[in-house]
Image (spheres, rainbow, N blue to C red):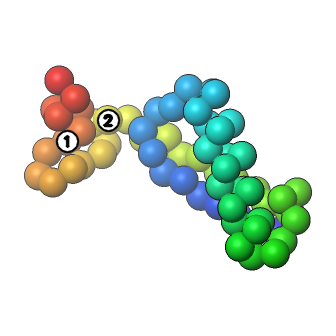
Amino acid sequence: MPVITVEAAHMNKEKKAELVEKMVSVASEVMGIPEEAFVTLIKENEFDNIGNGKKLLSEKMK
């Protein structure tokens, strides 16, 4: 059972569904494993918990 893990900022349900669909499709094609075998985990992080360069993403998003 292959596992795909994504860590990102918050996304709406539609974006998560699109991401899972496309990632599993490509991984299945490349690895030659049926799509149904994949498990995808999405870990969402608050902007205060993401650094970009020397600043928190929450500061850059202001």
Q: Residue 8, located in which quarter of the rendered image?
A: top left
Mark 2 sits on what residue? 47
Left or right: 41 as drawn, with respect to 55: right
Quadrant of the image occupied by residue 56: top left
Q: Position of residue 3 (x, y in %)?
A: 70, 64
**Is the residue under label 2 in contact with that under label 1 (CB below 8 Å)?**
yes
Q: Residues within 10 Å of mark 2 (few under 14, many from 20)?
A: some
Picture coordinates of residue 20, whole percent (x, y):
67, 46
Front in this rendered view, residue 13 or 56: 13
What kind of element bears circle 2? Answer: helix
Q: Residue at x 84, y 59 (%)?
A: 35
Name the amino acid type tagged 2. Answer: Phe
Image location (x, y in percent) of residue 41: 65, 51
As drawn, the label of residue 24 is none
| Residue at 59%, 58% in the rendered image | 5
- Report helix, strand or loop for mark 1: strand
| Residue position marked by numbered label 1 in the rendering | 56
Q: Is residue 14 above or below residue 53?
A: above
Which of the two labelled residues, at mark 1 and mark 2, occupies the earlier sequence position? 2
Q: Is residue 15 above or below residue 20?
A: above
